Image (tube, grey):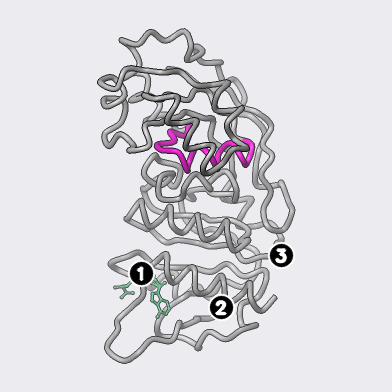
Amino acid sequence: MEGARRREPTARGAAGERSAIGPKLPGQARPAPWADIPDRRLVEACRAARRDKTLAVLEGFHPLKHALRFGADVHVVLTRDLEHLQQLCDMLAPDVWPAIRAQARVVEPDLFARLAPRPPDTGVLAVAARRVVSAHALLTASRKAPLVLLEEPTHLGNMGAVVRVAAAAGAAGVVTTGRHDPWGPDALRGGAGLQFAVPVARAEGLDRWHGPLLAVHPDGEMLTPGGVPDDAVLAFGSERRGLSWELLARADGRIAIPMEPGVSSLNLATSVAVVLYTWRLAR
Ligand SMILES: C[S@@+](CC[C@H](N)C(=O)[O-])C[C@H]1O[C@@H](n2cnc3c(N)ncnc32)[C@H](O)[C@@H]1O
């Protein structure tokens, strides 16, 4: 499959700005509509979608629900059981049923089981256009809520959990460095599709930024209510190695989360949650 349909993005950062979310990419070809792909080509089409950096593969009900709520351009909803899907909507999110119904394509359970490495228990998988977000624009724009910077995170579920809490707490966005894709299927699963609710982008490195760069590090000033500036870039280290010396040297300050003696560190997503909610509750 080549290229992807895109729509004018609607997501906004917590600052209410749209500058980091760009228009559609120039020269993109429209893909063949999913309705035209025969069943025998669906496994291959889903594999190609997982590799396509313009597409978001939404595995499971919650990522699809949030993608729709936050205005994603969903190309197809593949399900092994439409009645079960309607029941899930009735129970959890009746607001998204009309959009799901409009894009739903029912496939045999045997075929559905081959559409993803870990087929979702909820029996639904969808493909949507990703939001185009510029990491550089996110980092350099003025902002009224902190921006989360993850330095080389390694666990895709953790990256997703960070996106989820950033969306909930009203952060300005999430920027990641390193090779892992914060829009990949596993990160979308961990983020419950909230990549569509808050700007999320991968940066090649840290070049320029706006606002104080605060390293969140156990060896720092204790976190206090009111101690997190609205325009901060909050940097968190990777799960195993923590923050690099380079980043620590460039930071304007360090924030530590208090812990009981003997506890070496909090989980990455947990520490993002603590700092963002400390900021939010003191607003
Ligand atoms: C799982 S921890 C990394 C642990 C790593 N072994 C280390 O030595 O830094 C991932 C990130 O969460 C943040 N973190 C975890 N616990 C923290 C604490 N008590 N205070 C400040 N930051 C913390 C830091 O940004 C850290 O780099």
Query: Badges 2 and 1: C-beta atoms under 8 Å apart?
Result: no
Q: Distance of mark 2 from mark 3, alpha carbons?
A: 18 Å
The residue at the point 65 percent across, 57 percent down is: 140
Q: Secondary structure at mark 2?
A: loop
Q: Secondary structure at mark 3?
A: loop
Q: Position of residue 139 (x, y in %)?
A: 60, 57
- Classify residue 111 as left or right of residue 79: left
Give the residue pinned by disc 3.
Answer: 144
Give the magenta-colored segment's residue range: 54-71
Q: Is residue 39 above or below residue 70?
A: above
Observer-side mark, 2 or 1, equals 1
Give the residue pinned by disc 2.
Answer: 252
> Front-most of 120 and 240?
120
**Is residue 68 part of the magenta span, yes or no?**
yes
Query: Badges 1 and 3: C-beta atoms under 8 Å apart?
Result: no
> Front-most of 124 and 194?
124
Q: Distance of mark 2 from mark 1, alpha carbons?
A: 23 Å
The residue at the point 49 percent across, 22 percent down is: 76
- Classify residue 89 as left or right of residue 245: right
Q: Position of residue 275 (x, y in %)?
A: 52, 74
Quarter occupied by residue 153: bottom left
Query: Badges 2 and 3: C-beta atoms under 8 Å apart?
Result: no
Q: Is residue 12 above or below residue 55?
A: below
Q: Could you tell me which quadrant the N terminus lies in?
A: top left
